[in-house]
Image (cartoon, helix red, strand yellow):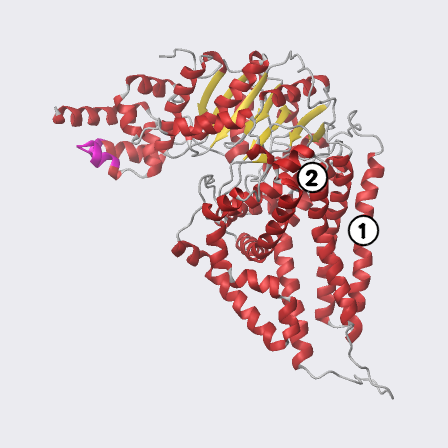
Amino acid sequence: MIQAPFLPPEAPLGMKAQSLQARPGRSARPMTAPTLIGLRRLLVIGSAIALTLAAAREMYLVLNGAGPSLLGIVVLLLFVVLFAWIALAFTSAVAGFVSLLGHGGLSLGITRDGPLPELSARTALLMPTYNENPARVMAGLQAIIESLAATGRLGAFDVFVLSDTTNADVWIAEEAAFLSLRERLRVQARVFYRRRAKNTERKAGNIADWVRRFGGAYPQMMTLDADSVMDGGTIVRLAGAMERHPGVALIQTLPVIVNGNTLFARMQQFAGRVYGPMIAYGIAWWHGSEGNYWGHNAIIRTRAFAEQAGLPTLPGRKPFGGHILSHDFVEAALMRRAGWAIHMVPGLPGSYEESPPSLTDIAIRDRRWCQGNLQHAKVLPARGLHWVSRLHLMMGIGSYVTSPLWLVFLLCGIAISVQSHFLRPEYFGATKSLFPNWPRVDPVLARYVFIGTMAILLAPKLFAWIALLFDRQARRGSGGALRSLLSVLIETLVGGLVAPIAMLIQTGGVLSILAGRDSGWNAQRRDDGRVPWREVWRGYWRHMLFGLVLTAIAWTVSPALFLWMTPVLLGLVLAVPLAAITADRAPGLGLARLGLLRIPEEVATPPILARANALARELEATIPADPLEALLRDPALLAAHRAMLPPPRRRGEGAPEADLLVGLAKLSDADTLPAALAGLSARERAAVLGDAGGLDRLLALHRVASAALV
């Protein structure tokens, strides 16, 4: 059995929480900032402002044909805010379209091809995991390590599995899978495992704990996610770029979504692969050295992170106060505040991730992200932030706040229609006049405003498809010009139907957060998204009912209003079947067989993806059905588990752990192992398995049971 240490010698690195009130010293412009970056930003943001002003003028003319009103003013203000949101996305997409055609998605001397750089600094690959499938996690890691070995640069990397797992069975299975990984790789000193008994501050705290304990030995760290897979050559090129540019703190890649099977996942996958590059090229073009961080598949300078990215605890109670949930945006902003450059390189291939399989799963994830992004309202006033970093935070907030704004805009528009239909207009008003004030709304102008808004909203998809045609490999991998166009239409149609459902889901999330409800922290489901019909009905009948009520109101007011609102009404009325069908594998795989919603990575699967998927299938069969039984029966696993336990609590060192004390008391009262396990809660079970005394008691009960069987 492997005798290598499960952790390397500690190399502490200080990482204190940063103050949001203290102004840091003035930072110099990063050396890696693109030339004429100010002009780029003026073109993108200035064009968005010009479009918004023009649209606002036209909307003003539409709404004030019948004279000013409170509802009209509210609708106009909401229209300006929402149009500005889509206008900035449009102008950024145009910049991305030009940059993509000009192959401008690489910077910092990074190349897609050519010789790999030699490396002199050590880099840690960090895989945080929280109650994830151990087979999938270890399969991805093994594929990454094998790919790095093929580059001849594996010696420059150490790999850490950073577990925050709270489920006792998953924890034991995780340890067994880790030991098996070490045996298969035969690189004993380079793959390590650490589990935290208390997952304080969630993922951000997990990474920070590693930095404080081991960061001093690693100039660079690569953050991954449980579903991340990255090509070894890509990792080496990123590490080389960090060594060549000492003023850069972080380089973010563009992960490609893969392995989708359900209709929902395949839509997300196709949209990310076809529209994603253009969007990423656009923001990289005008963000420059003030880029953003998405939390994974990025390389980070450890010293910069330790010195500047320590997250403060926000004042107030949850959900707005406490630990920062959406940590990545804030960490990037704090490092940039200190003068470090943050870059994105969307043109570098070899970075992959997965998508939630259903609308229900993405709603659960978005609820947590929503709370984290709304917390950024308390970070926005922080002193010394670069204005682009503030814009990142505002856009993160806006990505969720716009949903309730769209809903209010929709309801106010309906209210105006109801008002004009049922209330008698005042022809003369309060003043005496010889001529009546005839209410009038220009239907032609209203139609033009609607068409213009939809064009601004949908044009980026058309631009992305046109850009796809210029990339022969991507075009063929997406089914060719015709099939890829049909895929765009399918994604747009189904996505348009799902959009109003998502609007209500996000609005509900915002309202629940404002009501003071915390999101908690749940493991993300990454497999088949099929949801039982009963559960779908329970989750979406309210959306359907809301759609039926709106339909009745629209039809009562006028058939014309009903027709205008049909896309929104249809999606809401069909909420239950849409949620069920998009979560099913059959329609997704059926379209794939027709060559629709297909991505190049499915046609010519990158070797590292093929290897990771094959390993995941192979390792799934090795996960023990009863991990605790496997632990108590396998001396090697038991010895490793004991060796990886944290040191016991010393007298006077913090408060005693209540779950451990209660769990030990229950074990001492139990006569049989089944009775002992049945009496333990999930948290108590994890606590006693993390304690040497609790483990001894479980072993004693197991021996009694084994002796009785003999």
Identify the residue at image location x=44%, y=34%: 132
**Image quarter of residue 701:** top left
Residue 671 inside the magenta-drawn segment: yes
- SS at mark 2 in the image: helix
Q: Give how far across and how far down residue 42 sits, in percent.
A: 83, 42
Q: Is residue 437 above or below residue 29?
A: below
Residue 49's disc is: 1
The numbered mark, 2 or 1, whose residue comes first in the sequence reads 1
Residue 44 visible, this angle:
yes
Instruction: Determine whether, in the image, residue 627 is placed left or right of residue 214.
Output: left
Instruction: Determine whether, in the image, residue 679 is placed left or right of residue 616.
Output: left
Residue 584's disc is: none
Q: Is residue 215 above or below residue 167?
A: above
Q: How many marks?
A: 2
Residue 157 visible, this angle:
no
Q: Between residue 192 and residue 337, name the one nearer to us.
A: 192
Residue 468's disc is: 2
Q: Amino acid at mark 1?
A: Ile
**Residue extent of the magenta highlight:** 668-677
Q: Give how far across and how far down residue 334 sits, in percent.
A: 67, 33
Q: Give how far across and how far down residue 125 sits, in percent.
A: 55, 22
Identify the residue at image location x=69%, y=41%: 392
Q: Amino acid at mark 2?
A: Leu
Local packing at callout 1 (Cα closer than 10 Å; few below 14, some 14-19, many 20+) is: some
Residue 19 inside the magenta-drawn segment: no
